[in-house]
Amino acid sequence: MAVPKQRTSRSRRDKRRATHKVSAPRLNECPRCHSPRLPHRVCKVCGTYAGREVISFQPAEAGETTTTTDQTEV
C-alpha cells in the first residue's frame, strides 16, 4: 500500500491548490435589450429567450413587482 514517507508541507500543498479558483461568470448580451445576461437563460429585463417572449411583465401598482409566465411553449 502506498504511504507517503514525508508530510506534505503547507507551501507545497498551497502551491498545488493555487489553481483551484472560481472564475467569473461569462455574460452574453441580450439581442433584444442589450443588457448582460447568463447564456441559455431568460433575460430578466425584457423576458425573452431564443427570439420569443417567455415572461410577460404586467404593469405593477404602488411599486409591486409581479410577473406571469407563459407555460404554453417551454
Image (cartoon, rainbow, N blue to C red):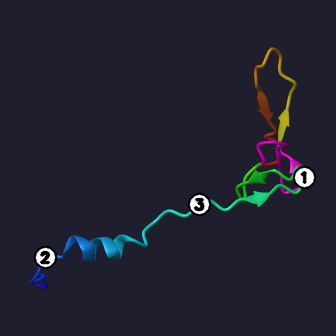
Residue 24, numbered label: 3
Q: Earlier in the sequence, mark 3 or mark 1?
A: 3
Using the numbered discs, state the Cα–Cα distance from disc 2 to disc 1 in whole angstroms: 57 Å
Which image quadrant for residue 13? bottom left
Q: Which is more toward the observer, 11 or 6? A: 11
Residue stretch rendered in magenta on the structure: 43-54
**Mark 1 nearby-residue class (10 Å; few <14, some 14–19, many ≥20):** some
Give the labeled residue for mark 1: 32
Could you give the CA–CA distance between mark 2 and mark 3, rounded to whole angstroms?
34 Å
Tell me the chief SS of the magenta region.
loop
Percent of width and height locating residue 28: 76, 60
Q: Position of residue 17 (x, y in %)?
A: 35, 71
Residue type at tag 3: Ala
Q: Position of residue 73 (x, y in %)?
A: 82, 47
The question of residue 64 being in magenta is answered with no
Task: Judge depth for marks 3 and 1 and give the one in front.
Answer: 3
Q: Amino acid at mark 2?
A: Arg
**Residue 74 position (above or below residue 39):** above
* Farthest residue, direction front: 11
